[in-house]
Image: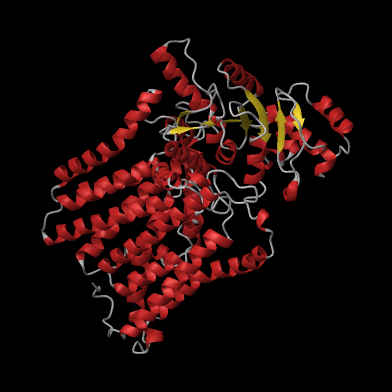
Amino acid sequence: MATTEISDTPQELDAGMMIRRALFLLLLIGLALYFLGLDFRGLSTSKGMEQAVVSREIAKGNGFYTTILKPLAWKQIEKKVKADKGPGEALDLTRVPDTYHSPLNPLVNSLVLGMAKNTWELGETQSIYTPDMLIAGLAMVLLLASIGINYLLISRIFDDRIGGVTALLMLLCEMLWRFSQTGLPQMLMLFLFSFGTYFLYKAVENEVQGKGTLLWISLTGGFFGLLGLAHWITLWIFFGLLAFVVIYFSRRLLLMVVLLGIFGLITGVWGYLNYQATGNPFGAGLYVFYSGLGGTGSEEALFRDLEQTVGGLNFNGFISKIIINSMGQITELYSYLGGVVAAPLFFLSLMHPFRRKEIADFRWAILIMWLCAVLGMTFYGIKSIQDNATHENNLHLLFIPLMTGYGLALLSVLWNRLNIPLNIPLVRNGHFILAILISGLPSVMNNAPRVMALNRTDKQLRVMYPTYVPRLLNDYAKLLPENEIIVSDIPWAVAWYGQRSCVWLPKDQNQLTRLMGLGKDKGTPISAILLSPNILWCKLNETSQISSEFFDWRQYIMFYPALGLAKTQNETTAILEMLTSDMPIKNYFPDLGGPFGRVYLFMTESKIAGPKPSETN
């Protein structure tokens, strides 16, 4: 369906269409092989690994459990257990219900992991963990499916040309491919959101034509309910959808009730399970709400605190946080929209009088949902695109296809009004060509040198170095009996690659000592500590400040560089004796070494046999 603003053009030869589709398919295959092959270094985000751990537990038949113990989330569940079963009941430290993450992404990934259980063990010569590739591969399939759905939707709204260019710009959007490498649910969210908006547009079409809308709104509600199960922050997009339905449709009361009923029925099941485990339907997400208020510092600091010494309804700094987060999103909007040049033009298209009413009306649905999404990201935070290009709260990317479609439509209108020879195909499609070049060239130029560098890099080093080295994490984990627990600042990686229970490094040593006592009582002792470069490579002058979140662990951080001065076992022992007076876990285990050098600090409660320091230098 072509808009009246876009001039009619003669149909090109079928041969030309076939060539374009063949080139699109070749580009698709090439990009998929690059991002899942040469460029892939394993799951790249902590939240992605946390969800992967839950997926593996589901695939084992254990249900929605996790082997990552976040002190505050564990304490929340323990309170409920003691309230139900009595104060003498103690909660297991090795495996607890996961009430933080939305369930759909772990559930979908568990289907793939369950079909490949023989890949769960990291091979002796493997650098990349095979389940990482399975999860990323599934995300890429969902990305490609989303491109297909949006091609159909944009083609329905405008025409095949705009639909095709939108699909190509999505394919060239590096940010979408980067998200598929994270383990995060964004590609599943994009898939569900694309279906939901397709049915919403059908409802808008029927409203304009005076036809029934109940079926399409029901389908929209179903997909938005699944979207809520993919990530809880998408509730804000649903609020926007609800507002649009109430404002726009004639049978607003009925449609609002249907929409709320379907959405509530789908998401309410997970809320009930959270209530059973924790005593509230939000589960550990309740503390994320606290962190969004501005008075708790960071989400990380909140969840590492066993006693929740900060948190609750604390609005200190709330206004400044809102201003900083909202201004950050505005100034970096182009980057948040994937660097697709046509996407921000959506906001200019709001001023264009589209002649087809359904096209003009549907853009307001997009705007309202986007504004509500921005509000949610403002409350709960989204890091600068420069600091974290694949933040777990990024909802902007869901709107890239629709905004791109409207932006391209506006470009077509303006281009056709220029006094240029539109009978020449290259000129007639010049605005599309420019949009593709401006959007795609930066990614090509950035990745071309990277391809050359990767070709020269040892495959063993193609990992998320230095923070996540699967081979080392797996080898360290195997040094301990299965019933023993490790405490770490990267518990998601230890639990995922080491396949064992891991406690997130608590706020202070007193809290760790309490957890260690509970572990011994349950026969699951916390017997080792593993620290990553995230904490070991921080500035010592910052760590020594009492306000630092790692102040209580400063002796470990100082011990790490001091090890580099030791040339013999005796020197290592002397350094250890100087620095370990207050360390709850004191026995240093020499580095495993290999091609990675000295990466982690691994210490145990009791000595275990290992290589001499000189053998790993």
Q: Is residue 196 left or right of residue 403?
A: left
Farthest residue, direction front = 118
Query: In this orientation, which residue lies closer to the viewer: 339 or 172?
Result: 172
Q: Is residue 585 left or right of residue 75?
A: right
Task: Reply above or below: 25 against 140.
Answer: below
Q: Position of residue 172 (x, y in %)?
A: 47, 67
Figure coloring: secondary structure
Q: Residue at x 41, y 35 (%)?
A: 61
Quarter of the N terminus within the rendering: bottom left
Query: In this orientation, which residue lies closer to the viewer: 78 or 544?
Result: 78
Q: Is residue 205 left or right of residue 578?
A: left
Q: Residue at x 50, y 66 (%)?
A: 31
Q: Is residue 298 visible?
A: no
Q: Position of residue 483 (x, y in %)?
A: 58, 26
Q: Position of residue 36 (x, y in %)?
A: 52, 59
Q: Residue at x 43, y 55 (%)?
A: 397
Q: Quadrant of residue 153?
A: bottom left
Q: Residue at x 55, y 60 (%)?
A: 37
Q: Is residue 65 visible?
A: yes
Q: Position of residue 132 (x, y in %)?
A: 52, 49
Task: Reply above or below: 94 against 218.
Answer: above
All told, the count of numbered labels is 0
Quarter of the C terminus within the rendering: top right
